Amino acid sequence: MSKYQLDYLEQLEAESIFIMRELAAQFENPALLFSGGKDSITLVHLAKKAFAPMKIPFPLVHIDTGHNFPEALAYRDNLAKEIGAELIVRKVEDTIREKKLTEPKGKFASRNWLQTHTLLDTIEEFKFDACIGGARRDEEKARAKERFFSVRDEFGQWEPKLQRPELWNIYNGRIHKGENVRVFPISNWTELDVWNYIKKEKIQLPSIYFAHQRDVIEYEGQLIAVSDFITIDENDTIINKKVRYRTVGDMTCTAAVESDAATLDEVVNEITASRISERGETRIDDKVTEAAMEDRKKGGYF
């Protein structure tokens, strides 16, 4: 009799599907936080597998800063329509106006810090008791501190010292009224795992993940896309380069990398050879302070 074994991608997939089903069993009103990036796209694919032949039993929620890549927005709309999922979009711009928030100024004025207000308002509006996120432990120091089930208090805040133990694949989703849980099914995945899984499952991605020609400016060694959301001054030189994106954030805070990788095989080879994390290489907003991400997460960020 042959021995049944799972390869490492199948093991990761099985773990993530188990967490998805635990989430559905323990919570009454969950949602999947969707950005149009490869990690949240992978989550949708896993959710489809977890609950097939049914539709996924929760909505996709996008907190729209207004500074998104058009390719990611088009993909978001097409995917929601294709799988028949409810898509909830809430705009940071509306929150800025309603709460009279001060919008950041400067060359790359990012609304990333303001997303937290819109996210917490959206959770309150729809009474979500759990929100699925695509964070991975290899991305950044603060995200390495998360559990699969990460509790947020009644103010939406995160306390890393009060994480619950998760022994023997037992996940505690009990919360008090007003609290909610962030759930991270691909926490044990790496960037390369995600790309290998996308390749294995033949998952379609937004075109910006593959090499293309784009007008950019070079700023402190990083290539920033020319857009209406950044300030271009007389010291900037607009150049056209062949680039792709390792991660999809706002156009104001996400840098491109020079690349000829136009296929999944070529992207996987490029990531395999890289010695710099995707956020370390391409996310401007994570370079503000050493604890930038942790400070945002404590305040209720994704």
Image: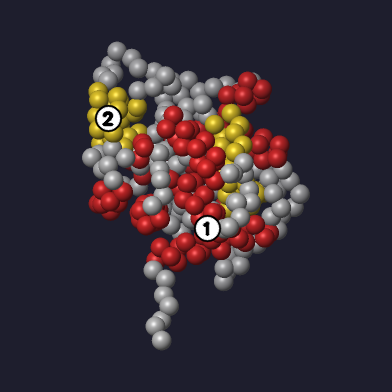
Q: Which mark is residue 213?
A: 2
Work out whether residue 73 or residue 108 is closer to the camera in this orientation and state it. 73
Relative horizontal placement of residue 83, taking residue 230 as reference (left or right): right
Colour basis: secondary structure
Work out whether residue 208 or residue 220 is closer to the camera in this orientation and state it. 208
Secondary structure, mark 1, is: helix
x and y, in percent, of residue 212 in the image: 28, 33
Relative horizontal placement of residue 45, taking residue 275 as reference (left or right): right
Is the residue marked by circle 2 packed among few (<14), some (14-19), or many (20+) residues within 10 Å? few
x and y, in percent, of residue 288 in the image: 43, 34
Q: Quick check: 48 above or below 297?
A: below
Q: Which residue sits furthest right? A: 177
Quadrant (top left/top right/bottom left/bottom right) for the C terminus: top right
Q: Which residue sits furthest bottom? A: 1
Work out whether residue 68 or residue 285 is closer to the camera in this orientation and state it. 68
Q: Please give the name of the residue rendered at 46% of the width and 30% of the height, measured from the top-left corner.
A: 68
- Looking at the rendered structure, the kind of residue marked 1 is Lys
Q: Nearer the viewer, mark 1 or mark 2?
A: 1
Q: Quick check: 21 above or below 104?
A: below
Work out whether residue 225 or residue 72 is closer to the camera in this orientation and state it. 72
Q: Which mark is residue 146?
A: none
Can see residue 107? no
Q: Are marks 1 and 2 in contact (CB under 8 Å)?
A: no
Q: Which residue is mark 1?
A: 49
Q: Please give the name of the residue rendered at 50% of the width and 37% of the height, measured from the top-left corner.
A: 78
Q: Quick check: 90 above or below 82?
A: above
